[in-house]
Image (cartoon, helix red, strand yellow):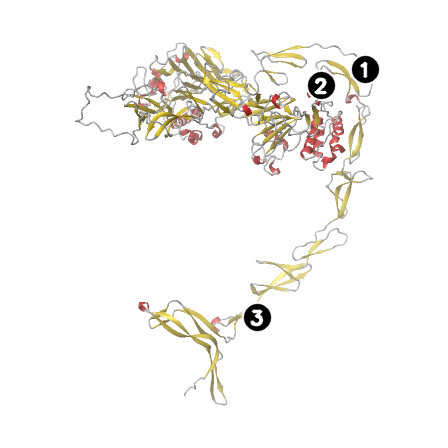
Amino acid sequence: SREIRLLEGRIQEIATDPGAEKNYKVDLRGGYIVIETNQGMNFMWDQKTTVVVHVAPSFQGKVCGLCGDFDGRSRNDFTTRGQSMEMSIQEFGNSWKITSTCSNINMTDLCADQPFKSALGQKHCSIIKSNIFEACHSKVNPIPYYESCISDFCGCDSVGDCECFCTSVAAYSRSCSRAGVCIDWRTPAICPVFCDYYNPPDKHEWFYKPCGAPCLKTCRNPQGKCGNLLYSLEGCYPECSPDKPYFDEESRECVSLPNCTSCDSEEKLCTEDSKDCLCCYNGKTYTLNETVYSQVYGPECSDAVCGPDGVIIKTLFPCGREASTPAQEVHMQPVTSAPPLSMVATPCFCSDNGQLIPMGENVSLPVNISGHCAYSICNASCQIELIWAECKTGHTEALKICDPDSEACPPTPAPSATSQVPASTGTPVSDCLELIPPRKFNETWNFGNCQIATCLGEGSNIKLSSTACPPQQLKLCVNGFPFTKHYDETGCCEVFECQCICSGWGNEHYVTFDGTYHHFKENCTYVLVKSIHPDSYNFWIHIDNYYCGAIDGAICSMSLLIFHSNSIVTLTQAMEHGKETNLILFNDKKVVPDISRNGIRITSSGIYVIVEIPELEVYVSYSQLAFYIKLPFGKFYNNTMGLCGTCTNQKSDDAMKRNGEVIESFKEMALDWKVPDPTNRYCNPGVSEPAEIQYHQHCEPSNLCKIIWNLTECHRVVPPQPYYEACVASGCSEQHPGTQCQSMQTYAALCGLHGVCVDWRRQANGQCEASCAQDQVYKPCGEAKRNTCFSREVIMDTLPSQNNTPVFVEGCYCPDGKYLLNDRDGICVSVCGCTAQDGSVKQPREAWEHDCQYCACDEATFNISCLPRPCAKSPPINCTKEGFVRKIKARLDDPCCTETVCECDIKTCIINKTACNLGFQPVVAISEDGCCPIFSCIPKGVCVSEGVEFKPGAVVPTSTCEDCVCTDEPDVVTQTNRIQCVPVKCQTTCQQGFRYVEEEGQCCSQCQQVACVANFPFGNVTIEVGKSYKAPYDNCTQYTCTESAGQFSLTSTVKVCLPFEESNCVPGTVDVTSDGCCKTCIDLPHKCKRNVKEQYIVHNNCKSASPVPVPFCEGTCSTYSVYSFEASEMEHKCICCHEKRSHEVKVELVCSEHKTVQFTYVHVDECGCVESKCPKRRT
């Protein structure tokens, strides 16, 4: 809302939004100007070259610029305006230029070509590293400040200027103060600060303080609040006496509180006993009963007076009589804030029938409906409102209102065919005679708040009904534009209207008021718009097309002629400085925007010229090859004719001839609207006109035309179809396809007219670029007018926008913060006035002294006139010391006059330069007389080896088995840095199958192979010489490593198994051999074990509810038959797998019909091999 500029010796505050509240404070603390904002962003300026910015933690990650982005990560501090990370400080800084016209800054070593100033800067800036700042060295690193001090010293304009030096040291002192270390470093010889300048005669109130009080009691800060700054600032501070303890920022003196002239409206200015208080308004103080301001609001006047406790009391009274004193006036309210000049201050009073009602209070009216009463209430806008609420106690029923929507109205029977009309001799119908003013029976009147009152008689009975609005007649705008809405004269009913907009471009494309697109091309003058009833609005617009005599039909510029109030405005083109630009003629005389004559207003955006007729609400925009016209529907409905059609919301009558005949051919209609002009050579029938433009019916639309369909945000306010068709037709033309840009430009212009910003040129891939002057910038959505030095104070309305919808116009504009000097030269300036020799802008009639001349700015021409001033001659002088020569310089007591002095000139010195050895560099010292330099050699801080210099940390190559590095440690003998060497660290780790073997005479040996390495899918395996290996997944293959003459080889042996038939084995007895390679049969082991299976138990058609675990014995035992020679027969031994232990278990079975029975089965607990008697076999 406000822009603050810190200029040399002053602060400039620019209000970009005058109605916005000021949300910051400006204060002078010591030598710094401090700006504290309510949002937590604070600024400190030393009024010279240093600015310090403080932001609250809430700004983390929400700022950008040269100070970084404050997101807790230092790596991305150099983020450019384009959000890219930049390693170069120079590129980062240049990206944050406010205007592109400023040249890029190249970083150079300011001391490289100035050895004398470099030496002098090192001498002065060494104070930062001296004992004076010793207490701060551990808190703040002094080296960056020391180096910056030398660089700034070399960058000063002259050696005698200590401003850069003092500012650099002050920056380090301020950082120390921020770290909690106060350094009193200034002396009468080193950067002195003279505070006596601020002391009045015979007073000593101002003193220098290196770390002054940030919480000084002032008239604007009577409590001495510390604000947001956490450390003190050096500078001149007043020391106020106990009888005058407050510092007045306005008078710059110590005063008692009643004598304060400046104040802050948020701070209360009262003495400790609260007996004496001051009122604060607009930064100024007022004493008790003093008038603060007076204002007039229509028939009522008001005075604001300073009351008790610092409260401003506002009184309202009818104009024409004197206001009562605040002590006697009964209608007073405190004013808590300053009211804008154009608005009523709040709190305030409302006037209701001569009675003043304070804001927020109400007065009951003599109206009662079923216990609900009407009240007049004074709202926050100081307007009377009528509200309904429950009646207060004791409210009498003086007026009866019948609300037709409530039960309070007695039912009124509808008249029937047999009902009799009362005879005139009967009882007369009573009127509402008790109303003020009295009303007749059935009389209606506006009751306010969009309600109609009707008198029902009986003295005071009335009926309220809402205002009836007529139905909307318009249902659709055939041109595709949306309705415009506004309220009628009653303010209760909305009225819908269509928009009458006609556009044309490319000398051939036209869209009528009712949205009909047609193309027509003839080189003559034609009527675009003309009133059907000229007596109502004497206004017309003509268009003049011409071909430039080109045989190929190339399009040349068109012109518009606008007539109103016996004045003609001609909008055309002219060559200026080799470029075709807009030319404006007002009654055949050249004019430049912004002007307003005879009810016609003309402005320009650079590309477009805008003509407005406020009386008729006419808006015309013109460029070289495009125009569009907007007329108010209410004034020009069915009141236009010409190439733009009839504005009747009907497309059927757009092709209307002069005689009112409606035809189908638009070309025939257009030719009928030709304007006879004998002076126009292009209308000569003898001039051959080019043939009708041929369009390809099946031409593929270009990508440029398709951009229209991307501008979806505009489709709801401007129909895109006609402009798309025209664009496609232009692109398909054999003679001039380039007019596609005009179709796009016209559509975008209409979008801007309706408050929709479209940047279509960015999507055109350079096909339709807009060019601007060097110091101007192109804006796709700029303001309808450009501010110039001669039109800044003109307040202009935007006619097409009756509902405050912004109007956007593309064009060439000055960068933000600059004005156009005039529309003729196209020069942008920061401040209007005369441009002085130093580049600053002087105000008209301002006088100043510059370059020993008295100059003044002429207010009419903005030219500068100067007169020189005389000077006395200086006495002769001789210079005898070496290096000193006579020079003419400005006198100290009068800089505008010169004197001859002796000054050091190094060029005249006899300089013996010394050649320095490797590792040393030349330095310059100043001779005792302070002029000629003396060269000497000092170590560079590098290492020297084999005639080569190495910086600390660099590797120094040697021929021995050592690694050498240059160190920071100096050698007291050679004065160069020492070289530190350590034995070379050899790489002794070898790959698999190799071993590191040392060799004599070598710094490092090599790895030699000692084993074979076999590669397997699961990894590599090392196999020593003479040893074998089998892979876990292949027991039939054996790998063996052998070595011969230093060559290692890995062989594999595969074992072949005998044929094996698994069916020959007892099932379950198949196994592999011991080496794991071949299969074989094994003896079946005797295994008898107990197993368990779960199964349903079924018995006699009964079944267990769930599976039951049933143990059983399973396995083989040693059963065999052998012939016994003793018994002479076969002996049989039967050993079976039987149960050894068991018990009975009962389980419940479920039978049919849901009956249950108990069933007992044998549950095996242990199994084993049990010998059975085998029966002898009978022969």
Query: Pointer 2 and pointer 1: residues touching (CB < 8 Å)?
Result: no
Question: Of the residues under marks 2 and 1, which one precedes in the sequence?
Answer: 2
Residue ID for mark 3: 1074
Q: Whole-percent x and y of residue 188?
A: 75, 24
Q: Is residue 674 left or right of residue 909?
A: left
The answer to whether residue 440 is above or below residue 371 is: above
The image shows residue 640, relative to residue 1049, as above or below, that is above
| Distance in Å between CA atoms under marks 3 and 2 | 122 Å
Q: Please name the amino acid that badge 1 sits on.
A: Asn
Residue 1095's x, y, as percent?
40, 69
- Is residue 783 at least partly visible in the picture? no
Furthest residue to the front?
394
> In the shown orientation, is residue 901 left or right of residue 353?
right
Give the image quarter of residue 600.
top left
Q: Residue at x 30, y 15 (%)?
A: 659
- Whether residue 1045 is visible, yes or no, is yes
Q: How many marks?
A: 3
* Most foreground residue, 1004 or 442: 442
Which residue lies under the disc numbered 2?
A: 202
Across and down, in percent, residue 1153 comes to: 31, 68
- Above or below residue 419? Residue 579 is above
Foreground mark, 3 or 2, reads 2
Quadrant showing the C terminus: bottom left
The residue closer to the viewer here, 436 or 763, is: 436
The three-letter amino acid code for the residue at tag 3 is Ser
CA distance separating discs 3 and 1? 121 Å
Quarter residue 861 falls in: top right
Looking at the rendered structure, the secondary structure element under dot 3 is loop
SS under mark 2: loop
Q: Which residue, given by chain and number where applicable, does mark 1 sit on?
A: 878
